[in-house]
Amino acid sequence: MKTLLAALLAALVLAAPARAVPGSPDAQLRFFAVCTGRLSARMEHDWLVQSPRSDRTEAQRAAMAELLRAASPPSRGPEVMGWRIQAKASFAALLSRASFGRDPEDAAWAEARARALLATCESVLLG
């Protein structure tokens, strides 16, 4: 049942007119891995700052992780995990700059950049 759900989610995302998902299977795999990492960082950041949107972020992360699982061949597991971890660490640093940075201009830039990166990921999710 999970495989069917993941395949259905992937088909819906790939059939949607969203321009965010790259065309090649390899680029799509990397996109899903990077977005799963970013949403993981956002989820943990939401918990840290007790954000009211943490439930929504958690649901988005779960949906993106399902897409990643559906698109991932087992032979590429370590490579995909590396992309995911690198994206999570980078995005966590960006969120920290946005929330806790001492330079208001830099914090504003980091917030805008984080929003733009997340918007790209969210554009492929339903709801």
Image (spheres, rainbow, N blue to C red):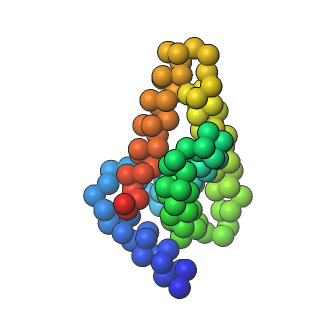
Q: Mark yes or no: residue 35 visible.
A: no
Q: Is residue 76 above or below residue 50?
A: below
Left or right: 124 as drawn, with respect to 110? left
In this rendered view, identify the residue nearer to me: 99 or 124.
99
Q: Position of residue 82 (x, y in %)?
A: 69, 50
Q: Residue at x 41, y 59 (%)?
A: 125
Q: Position of residue 90 (x, y in %)?
A: 63, 37
Q: Is residue 110 above or below residue 48?
A: above
Q: Position of residue 103 (x, y in %)?
A: 57, 14
In this rendered view, identify the residue nearer to me: 5 or 100.
100
Q: Residue at x 50, y 35 (%)?
A: 114
Q: Residue furthest right?
A: 78
* Quadrant of the drawing holding the C terminus: bottom left
Q: How many marks?
A: 0
Q: Residue at x 56, y 28 (%)?
A: 98
In this rendered view, identify the residue nearer to me: 96 or 87.
96
Q: Residue at x 55, y 62 (%)?
A: 62
Res. 8 image quadrant: bottom left
Q: Residue furthest bottom?
A: 1
Q: Is residue 53 above or below residue 91?
A: below
Q: Position of residue 75 (x, y in %)?
A: 67, 67
Q: Mark yes or no: residue 52 visible.
A: yes
In this rendered view, identify the residue nearer to me: 23 or 9.
9
